[in-house]
């Protein structure tokens, strides 16, 4: 069966969040006419998910296991080959849906806009504050300079807009576009892989959409050694996209206003 949406979740020692995330997605789509499946990968973590597999064995939730930690991009690339759907929705386990019809609203944005291939919501913290860097700005002189320097500018915006990238924590993408771009670059183990993918999609003249009226609670950074992984990803990102030294100088000058990773 070809579903409208395949919801992909990669688990790495996040079982306490995972069950809530799956439940939220099921409840969110309960009264929707959208057909869907949920595919979960245990990324060689220490979690035992057998009880969850039993709990959801009669549903549209499927579990897979990797004997190697493939990283974020590698894990989702693998899951994309385990499912069939028009749209892929990538979810981090450590989030909660706090508004009704979150998935349907995201889905409708892609459905109504042929040029848009990726859409993401506004992420908020447990304190109900905006999570900084849930997207990267695209328009304006400083955002453009930041992108050329390998960074991003974030603004707390209140309207739907075209952006440079949206966070991989909640990342809805057209499957054809995902395949056309060959998915995530697995040289990024964790951090910046969604920025790289969106860069490549923009080069294909596709649009990335950010809708801040759709809010999702995201706990964030629950498993990763952020500094080390972020530095590694940034070095590879700079090398891959041949960041010009002049723009790096500008980047360093504006470092207080430009993000360096996720």
Image (tube, helix red, strand yellow):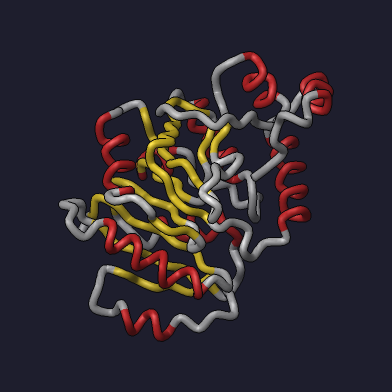
The residue positioned 69% from the left and 32% from the top of the image is 151
Q: Quadrant of residue 150?
A: top right
In this rendering, the answer to whether 53 lies above or below 225 is: below
In this rendering, the answer to whether 66 lies above or below 121 is: below
Q: Residue 60 location, x and y as percent? A: 26, 68
The residue positioned 29% from the left and 51% from the top of the image is 100
The residue positioned 29% from the left and 61% from the top of the image is 37
Q: Nearer the viewer, residue 203 or 22?
A: 22
Q: Nearer the viewer, residue 31 or 65?
A: 31
Q: Quadrant of the N terminus?
A: bottom left
Q: Residue 163 location, x and y as percent? A: 50, 28
Q: Quadrant of the C terminus?
A: top right
Q: Quadrant of residue 105?
A: top left
Q: Nearer the viewer, residue 86 or 210?
A: 210
Q: Is residue 220 left or right of residue 246?
A: left
Q: Residue 39 location, x and y as percent? A: 37, 65
Q: Residue 59 location, x and y as percent? A: 25, 73
The residue positioned 42% from the left and 32% from the top of the image is 209
Q: How many marks?
A: 0
Residue at the farthest front position: 127
Q: Is residue 35 left or right of residue 72?
A: left
Q: Is residue 231 left or right of residue 77?
A: right
In this rendering, the answer to whether 43 lies above or below 116 is: below
In this rendering, the answer to whether 59 lies above or below 113 is: below
């Amino acid at each position: 069966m070809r579903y409208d949406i395949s919801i992909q979740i990669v688990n790495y020692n996040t079982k306490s969040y995972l069950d809530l995330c799956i439940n939220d997605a099921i409840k969110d789509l309960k009264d929707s006419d959208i057909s869907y499946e949920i595919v979960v990968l245990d990324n060689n973590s220490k979690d035992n998910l057998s009880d969850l597999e039993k709990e959801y064995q009669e549903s549209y939730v499927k579990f897979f296991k990797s004997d190697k930690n493939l990283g974020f991009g590698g894990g989702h690339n693998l899951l994309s080959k385990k499912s069939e759907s028009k749209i892929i929705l990538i979810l981090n386990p450590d989030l909660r849906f706090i508004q009704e019809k979150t998935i349907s609203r995201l889905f409708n944005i892609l459905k109504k806009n042929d040029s848009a291939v990726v859409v993401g919501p506004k992420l908020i913290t447990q304190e109900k504050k905006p999570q900084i860097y849930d997207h990267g700005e695209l328009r304006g002189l400083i955002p453009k300079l930041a992108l050329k320097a390998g960074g991003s500018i974030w603004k707390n915006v209140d309207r739907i807009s075209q952006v440079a990238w949206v966070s991989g924590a909640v990342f809805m993408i057209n499957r054809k576009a995902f395949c056309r771009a060959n998915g995530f670059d697995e040289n990024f183990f964790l951090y910046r892989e969604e920025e790289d993918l969106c860069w490549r999609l923009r080069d294909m003249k596709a649009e990335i959409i950010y809708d801040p009226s759709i809010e999702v609670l995201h706990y964030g950074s629950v498993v990763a050694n952020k500094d080390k992984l972020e530095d590694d990803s940034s070095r590879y990102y700079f090398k891959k996209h041949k960041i010009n030294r002049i723009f790096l100088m500008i980047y360093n000058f504006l470092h207080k206003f430009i993000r360096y990773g996720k």
